[in-house]
Image (cartoon, rainbow, N blue to C red):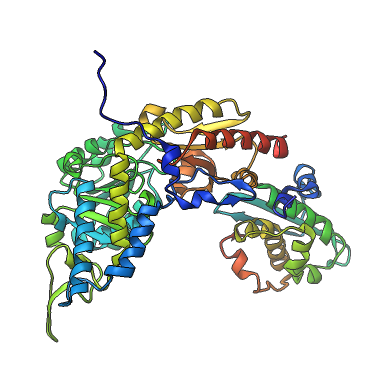
Amino acid sequence: MVAVTAQTKLDAGRLRADFPIFEQEIRGKPLAYLDSAVSSHKPRQVLDKLRSFYETSYANVHRGVYTLSEIATAEYEGAREKVAQLVNAPEARELIFTHGATESINLVAYAWGLDNLAPGDVIVVTELEHHSNFVPWQYIAKRTGATFTAIPLNEHGELRLDMLDEIARLGNVKVVANNLVSNALGTINPVERLAAWAHEQGAIMVVDAAQAAPHHAIDVQQLDCDFLAFSSHKMCGPTSVGALWGRASLLETMAPFNLGGHMIRSVTLEETTWGQLPYKFEAGTQPIAEAVGFGAAVDYVTDVGIEAIEEHERELLVYALDRLADVPGFVGYGPSPDRRAGIISFNIEGIHPHDVAQVLDMDGIAIRAGHHCCQPLMAKLGVAATNRASFYLYTIPEEIDRLVEGLHKVNKLLGP
Amino acid sequence: MSEFDQMYREVILDHYKNPRGHGELADADAHAEGQNPLCGDEVSIFVAFGEDGDTIDEVKFSGRGCAISQAATSMLMEMVQGRSAGEVASLPRDELLDEIGIPLTPVRLKCALLGLSTLKLALHKAKGTPLPEEWAGASGDLDLK
C-alpha cells in the first residue's frame, strides 16, 4: 500500500490563468514577474469581488439603519473574521484593519510606545528589518529617551542570538520587533524564540509579518507574539488595507492612534470616551471595499493552500539557486534554502543593480534593484544595492529560466 | 530596436567602458562629491581653470555607479572642456540629456544628472556661481558636498 498525501501540489500554470495581468506583454515579451516580495498580482476572484461589492452591496458600514448598510457591514465584518482566522487570532475584535503593515507598526509604536517607554528602556530591532519596522522604533526611541539597538547578523544573514545577553544588559528591554521573514534576504527568523526572550525581559514582541503572511502559515498563538502586522497587497489583495493583530489586554489599555468618527462612544465639549475594540483603532471611514477584497484574497490564498504555496516556492528556490550558480559573477546573499523563503538577493560582479534590472526589463523580466528599504542591511553587506528575485503561487520555472538567460545577456552587454 | 533597447546603445556603452576624463586632479581649483544614496552611484569631480581663472581647462571625474551615471558624466566631461565656469553653471540639463539621447525614467534621470549636479556644486563652491533651482527636484535626493 502506498501512502497518499492529501495535499495537492500547486499548479502554478493553471493558477496563473486566474491573473489577468499575465495576459499582457512587456516590450513584446510575456511578463516574467519576479518581484512578488514588493507586491503581488490580483486574481479575477478578488477583482470580481471588489467590483460586485461596489455594484451591489456598497454602503458605509456600522451606523446605517438601511438594508445596504447592513449588507455592507456584514461583508466588512465577514472579511475581518477571515483575516483573523488566517493568523489564528483568538478573537476577531483583536484584528484591526489598517492601511497596511507600515501603519500597523506605527500604530503600536505611537499608541503603545509613547506611553510605555522612558530613558533606561530598550527597544530591540534587528539589522534585517525593513525600514517600516526600524524607523518608527528609532523615532519613538528618540521621542521617549529609550535606547534603540539592533540584533546583528552573522555572515549567513541570520540573527546572532548569542548577542541577546549583551543586549539585555543595556537596560530594561521593553520592545522586541522583528520580521518573521526578511524581505531582502528571505531569512526566516526564530520569532518564537525571540518572543520567549522578550517576555522573559518583560517586553512586548512585535512581529512584522508583511513578507511572511502571504507565503507561510501564521499562528499568533503559537508564536506567542503580542502584535503582528501584515498587508493585503502582498497576498493577492488590494492596496491600501492591511491588518494589525494585537492582544486584547494590550489594545484595551493603549491610547488611541487615529481619532475621530467611529472610534468614539460619546463626545462632549468636556470629554470623549473611546469605543470598543476593534473600532477604537478604526477612525473615520475605513477602506471598506478594500477590506472586503482582502477577505476575498484570504479565501483565494487559503483555497490554493498556504502549505502548498510554501512548498512550491521552496522548489523554485532550489531550482533557481542551482541555475543561477552557473551565471558568471553571480554573488548570492542569505541563508541556505532550508532556512529561507522564496527570495534571492544577488549581485552580478562589477555590474550595478540598476543596469541589471534595466537590461532584464528589456526582455519583459521584472526584478527589483535597490536597497529594498533595508539600508542598515545593505551597509552590513557592504553594498549600496542588490538585485532581488522573488516568487509566489503564480511563478513558473520558465520565468527563472528567462532570468538566467537575461543575466547572461547582462554580462555580455555590460561585463568586462 | 525599441527606444528602450537603445538605453544601452553603443555610445552609452562606449562611455561606460571607456570613460573620458576619468581620474583625479591633485591641485584642483574646484572639487565636489556627489552620491545617490538610493542606489549608491558616486561621483567626484575635479576642475582646473586656465590662466583667466574662469575657463575650464581640465576636468576629471572618479567614482563608481551604474552605466547611466558613469556614461553621462563621461559625456559631460567632454562637453564642458574649454567653457567658462559661468556658462557651465547655467548649463541647461536638457543639453546633457540631448547628448545622452535616450528617454529616461525618473529613477534613471537621477543617475544621469548626478555628474552635472556635482559639477555645478564644485563651481559654486569655488567661484560662487549660482546653483539653479530648476533641477532642485531631480537632485533633491542626492547627497552633494
Q: Nearer the viewer, residue A204 or A41?
A: A41
Q: Nearer the viewer, residue A399 or A407?
A: A399
Q: How many marks?
A: 0
Quadrant of the snapshot with the N terminus of chain A: top left
Image side of residue A204 versus residue B67, left or right: left
Quadrant of the snapshot with the C terminus of chain A: top right
- Farthest residue in the top direction? A1
Instruction: Residue at 87% x, 62% y: name it.
Output: B82
Instruction: Residue at 75% x, 50% y: name it.
Output: B1
| Quadrant of the image occupied by residue A128 | top left
Instruction: Residue at 48% x, 27% y: name it.
Output: A319
| Picture coordinates of residue A398, whole percent (x, y) | 54, 34
Image side of residue B18 versus residue B105, left or right: right
Instruction: Residue at 26% x, 44% y: name it.
Output: A170
Q: Nearer the viewer, residue A319 or B145?
A: A319
Whether residue A354 can be seen here: no
Q: Nearer the viewer, residue A210 or B64?
A: A210
Against A394, residue B115 (above or below) is below
| Picture coordinates of residue A343, whole percent (x, y) | 44, 38
Whether residue A95 can be seen here: yes
| Picture coordinates of residue B19, whole percent (x, y) | 78, 46
| Picture coordinates of residue A383, whole percent (x, y) | 54, 41
